[in-house]
Image: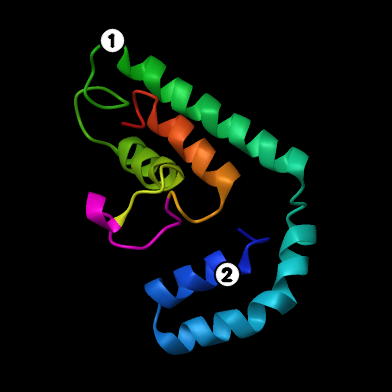
Amino acid sequence: MLYRPEVIFHLADRNVPAWHAWLFKAMFRLCRRRILTGLNVTAESVERGMDYIRREFESAERRLRDGRPFLCGDALTAADISFACLGGAVLLPQPHEGYGAQLPGQDSGCTQLVAFSNEMRRTKVGT
């Protein structure tokens, strides 16, 4: 989304107070390059990150194959909550699905992000 300012600006308008969105938009163009270089965002690093997420979803699926209801057994733990919070964002949940914030949707134009989200939604732990 760093290459799609119109998408990220739309999200800012929908998710934070107006003055936060204004400040974010003013600073975004100045900070974008530093974010990209500082975090070494490249096509290769994005693909590595997506592969890492795929492996984590597969690992969670393996843990649940034995019928346990939670990642670490019969009780909800920080592992379940962490996976739901961090992994859940990959699924791009929408307000009509009960999510409280606006994330990019199917029509956002972020084709790689949406395709990856759809891939992860087709997994057992992504449903």
The answer to whether mark 2 and mark 1 are in CB contact below 8 A is no
Kindly identify which numbered label has been placed on residue 54: none
Q: CA distance from mark 2 to mark 1?
A: 45 Å
Q: Secondary structure at mark 1?
A: loop
The answer to which of 111 and 56 lies nearer the viewer is: 111
For this orientation, the residue located farthest to the bottom is 19
Mark 2 residue type:
Glu
Helix, strand or loop: magenta stretch: loop
Give the amino acid at mark 1. Answer: Asp
Local SS, label 2: helix
Q: Is residue 32 left or right of residue 99?
A: right
| Residues packed near mark 2 inside 10 Å, few (<14), some (14 to 19) or many (20 plus) | some
Residue at the image position 34 percent from the left and 23 percent from the top:
124
Q: Nearer the viewer, residue 105 or 2?
A: 105
Magenta segment range? 95-105
The residue positioned 53% from the left and 86% from the top of the image is 22
Quadrant assignment for the N terminus: bottom right
Q: Which residue is mark 2?
A: 6
Between discs 2 and 1, the one toward the N terminus: 2
Q: Position of residue 10 (x, y in %)?
A: 48, 71
Is 33 drawn above or below residue 44 in the view shown? below
Q: Is residue 82 magenta?
A: no
Q: Quadrant of residue 103?
A: bottom left
- Please give the label number shown on residue 66: 1
- Furthest toward the top, the residue is 66
Residue at screen point 31% across, 42% down? 81
